[in-house]
Image (cartoon, coloured by chain):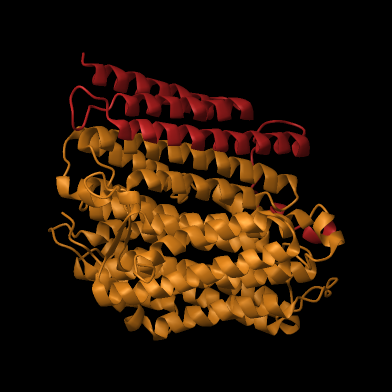
Amino acid sequence: MTPLALYTAAGVGLFAVGLWGVVARGHLFWKVLGINVMGGGIFLILLAAPPRLDPAQADPVPQAMVLTGIVVAVAATAVALGMALRVAARTGLPFLEEDAGDPGSGGGADERGRE
Amino acid sequence: MILDPVHWTTLAVMGPLLAGLLAMEGRPRAIRLGLVLGMGASVSATAGLWTTVVREGPLRHPLGGWGMPLGIELYADGLSVLMLAMTALVGSAVSLYATAYFGDISQRRVRDSPAGRGARFFAPLWLLLWGSLNGIYLSGDIFNLYVLLEIMGLSAAAMVTLAVTSKATVAGMRYLVISLVGSMFFLLGVALLYTVGGTLSLERLAQLELSGPLPAVALALMTVGMAAKTALFPIHGWLPPAHAAAPAPASAILSALVVKGSFYIMLRLWVHVFGGGAREGLLVLGILGATAVIWGSIMALRQLSLKRLIAYSTVAQLGYLFVMFPLLFPAGGGWSPDAWSGGLYHALSHAVAKAAMFLAAGSMTYAVARDDIRAISGIAHRLPMTFLAFGLGGLSLAGIPPSGGFVAKWLLLRSAVEQGGWGWAVLITVGGLLTLAYVLMVLRYAVDQTEEPPEFRDVPRRMEWAAMGLAIAALLLGIRATETLSLLEAGGIVPWR
């Protein structure tokens, strides 16, 4: 097994585990964590990308992508956790309660005038 | 040289982003200045790029000297400019509307109230979103697309939660999770494409004519990610609650513009990079789109919340954008220019009409402080201009001549009939009739004075005019279709492969 195949397989495995976490776990913290694990899997694949120009030298482009990806992931995680806290504060539970969605609920009323 | 037209591309991306940072400062003057600067940058850059692309064809701007073969560059062709123009037109109208909708931000009382969060944070979030949308339409490489997608997703989800209700918070959170997972699918596709092709450039990837299992898997992953963000059936469940719960200007932006960003990426990948991909894949997209047209329309007919009805209508109308995929590449090979112009014209006229409808609906719910179509009974007599704006937007969606929606549906229909795709033709017609049904349902409630008139709040003139301006634009799109569509031909389909 070539290192590339090994890393790619491991990366896809991590991606799948993370996705499973997002789908199967109800708690918002687990969902956010799952998304981060998915990202980790992708970074692994990128770092194993074959050298582009010089076989003796690692390709710097994927490394730059991973660094940028980490920055994006940190920002996204911060926003997501902040919003999860807001959900917990507003509804009392850190879960995505099922949207009732019945026609009569008048869902999403614009309650601006009453707050 | 500062006057080189390539700098319009930089202005279109950096202008709104920097204006957004300025507006983040929070004082009323900074917020107003940010909106004016962001709007000015977007509109002038779009105008500059429009004239340049029509005159000289596609434009490339290698950022920081990282051009080919790596291919980190900004790229503008007819398709990019059409999407930029759509964003500039709708964005400007919504910005004007928002300055009235959120109240007078120079009053401390308004800013410090819980609902005043909207007044403080709408402008910065919207400007960041605007910059990311412009960036998506101008990006020539797949990694920048990923970064811009994340900026778009984060600011869009945050905009939902500007409404201070637990419903909005939960809907915004669900949207954020879906959006982040969608981005991860896209990024995995980027990683796979880079390991295969060794480049990030869309154009270079197209020239490599990638084939084999790995590029196919990459395309499938990216498609799933973008379909989730575009709310393609059956991953559409997050859209109605999120778009309905957001404050009205945010709803208009999300329904009219944000979903088009991810749709555009999908279109670029399938048409330009993969040259149609596989016939089976195109058919799957088309069938899911067709299901969305029917399902979304039926759900819209069953809603009693006005904004939720319009949100389900978005699910239905987005379906047409996917029906376009199999029509683009007829079964016998070749390419259908009618499907291309029709599909893109649908994207454009849907954006304008849907924004007009959401803004008008926002004015109605603002007036009666309830989001229920029974509560707006007789509102046509109180707010005639808003009623007219909603009606014109709705009739354009339904494809009534001479609106923009009519031109779009006509072109799609002609493409379907020419290829003998009678199933598609029937679907396009039935979808239009269903649209007419739910629009007329709302209009009837608005005209009939069945209930006692509820408590009524005066609506600022600027809100009424912003919606009306978009409704008139939706109408003009039908009358001036040839001029607009010539843009697509000018720098339109670049044979990259």
- The spot of residue B76 in percent (x, y) is 32, 63
Q: Which residue occupies 42% across, 66% down? A: B84
B495 vs B464: above or below: above
**Where on the picture, by quarter, is residue B479?**
bottom left
- The spot of residue B482 in percent (x, y) is 32, 82
Residue A11 appears in the rendering = yes
Specify the quadrant that holds the N terminus of chain B: bottom left
Which chain, by letter, is orange? B
B247 vs A80: above or below: below
Residue B294 appears in the rendering = no
**Where on the picture, by quarter, is residue B194?**
top left
Q: Residue furthest top?
A: A1
**Where on the picture, by quarter, is residue B212?**
top left
Q: Which residue occupies 23% across, 27% down? A: A50
Specify the quadrant that holds the C terminus of chain B: bottom left
- The spot of residue A36 in percent (x, y) is 50, 28
Q: Colour of chain A?
A: red
Q: Nearer the viewer, residue B243 or B492?
A: B492
Judged left or right of residue B256, residue B184 is left
Q: Nearer the viewer, residue A41 or B336?
A: A41
- The spot of residue B327 in percent (x, y) is 26, 61
Q: Nearer the viewer, residue B1 or B480?
A: B1
Count of picture labels:
0
Q: Which residue occupies 72% across, 38% down? A: A86
Q: Residue furthest front?
A: B1
